[in-house]
Every structure is written in structure tokens, then in C-alpha cells.
Image (cartoon, rainbow, N blue to C red):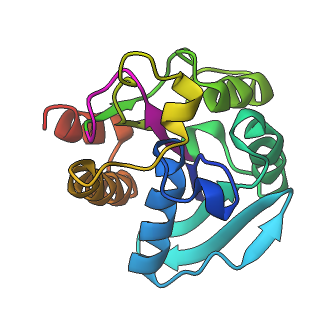
Amino acid sequence: MKLIIGLGNPGKQYAHTRHNIGFDVIDALAEKWGAPLNQTKFNGMYATLHRPEGKVMLLKPLTYMNLSGECVRPIMDYFDIAVEDIIVIYDDLDLETGKLRLRQKGSAGGHNGIKSLIQHLGTQDFNRIRVGVNRPPAGMKVADYVLSKYSQDERPIMDDAIKKSCDAVELALTKKFLDVMNVFNGA
């Protein structure tokens, strides 16, 4: 089974903020695939579906960003999902708005959700789709920036990034992640 994890924070006040791009991608996949996230376990909301490529689980940890690993590890253990079968989708301040960067491993780069995953999974070697949200304007705190909503100009760029992220996930169901990286990192 493939496990697609979107990082974010639960609650209406965080919906569609920069930090919740992972949740937005999971919601878009759930809608596209007709798979509502209506199951809960280990403080996560998920949907399991059978696709032609095999069984897939879409997961939104409800632990808040900084504790994401506390949901993901038990889900992986319970459903016997290997670390090479996960894809984590999250926001990245070091990429320009809407830019995707796929990686198979790496440090947390200051991202607390990824720090939590690395801690609970015991490895930095897992597939990820990083979605650029850019750096905050001068004088704005990072926390305030990532918890803010997109500007009117940014919204169509992020909608396109969500679509491309969905395309990358779908391709990763049939291709090696390295091949998917070659397609999307060059775009």
C-alpha cells in the first residue's frame, strides 16, 4: 500500500494557509478520486482506496504540524506500510511560491513537521513533495507568514501547484520516485 501524507494543522483558522498546502493536496486528491477522508485512527483522518495501480491511503495527521510523526508512525505500523511506500507533501519557505521540488531524502531544513517525521520514523530517507511558499516579507515573523492565507495574486499559482502535486502523486503510483523527480524537478 502507498501512503500519501499531507502535512498541515487541523481547524478552520488554518484552512488554506501556506502551512496547510499538504492538506490542500490531500483534499484535492480525495475529491479527484472520489475518496472522502471519513476514517480516523491514531489522531489522523484518512481514506483508503483501491486504484488500478494498487491500494492507496490518503492521510492528514490531526496532531498539528509539529507532532506529525506521532500520527504517521502508528499508522505505518498498524497498516504495515514501509517507509519507501510513503510520500510526504508539505510547504517550503526556500522555494518560490508554487514551485515544486521532489526529493527522496534530506534533512528537515527547519521544518518542524519533517523534524517530527524524521524523529518518529528514525530516518531521513523518505519521498517528499515540497511546495514553495516563499519567504515572508521583511519584518514579518515566519510563524505569522506560514499561518496566513495566500494573496489574490498567489492563489492561482498555488492552485496550479496543487494540481501539479496531484499529478506527481499519480505518476508515483506507477513509476519509480526518481523518475517522477526527473519529470517534475525540471518543470
Badge count = 0
The furthest residue to the front: 139
Question: Where does the image place residue 173, in percent across and percent down from the top left?
Answer: 40, 57
- Which quarter of the figure has residue 177? top left
Q: Residue at 35% across / 42% down in the picture?
A: 176
Question: Where does the image place residue 117, in percent across and percent down from the top left?
Answer: 70, 31
**Is residue 127 among the parts visible in the rendering?**
no
Question: Where does the image place residue 119, in percent across and percent down from the top left?
Answer: 76, 22
- From the image, which quarter does the C terminus lie in? top left
Position of residue 183 in the picture relative to residue 68 (left or right): left
- From the image, which quarter does the N terminus lie in? bottom right
Range shown magenta: 86-98
- Which quarter of the figure has residue 70? top right
Task: In the rendered view, tell whether residue 122 sits above or below residue 20.
Answer: above
Position of residue 167 in the picture relative to residue 23 (left or right): left
The one nearer the camera, 92 or 88, is 92
The one nearer the camera, 62 or 149, is 149
The furthest residue to the bottom: 34
Task: In the rendered view, tell whether residue 116 sits above or below residue 46.
Answer: above
Q: Residue at 64% across / 73% down in the picture?
A: 47
The furthest residue to the left: 187
**Is residue 70 among the parts visible in the rendering?**
yes
Task: In the rendered view, tell whether residue 52 sits above or below residue 23.
Answer: below
116 magenta-colored: no
Position of residue 18 in the picture relative to residue 37 (left or right): left
Q: Residue at 80% across / 69% down in the picture?
A: 40
Question: Where does the image place residue 169, in percent across and percent down from the top left?
Answer: 38, 54
Position of residue 71 in the picture relative to residue 90 (left or right): right
Q: Residue at 84% across / 55% down in the picture?
A: 78
The one nearer the camera, 164 or 95, is 95
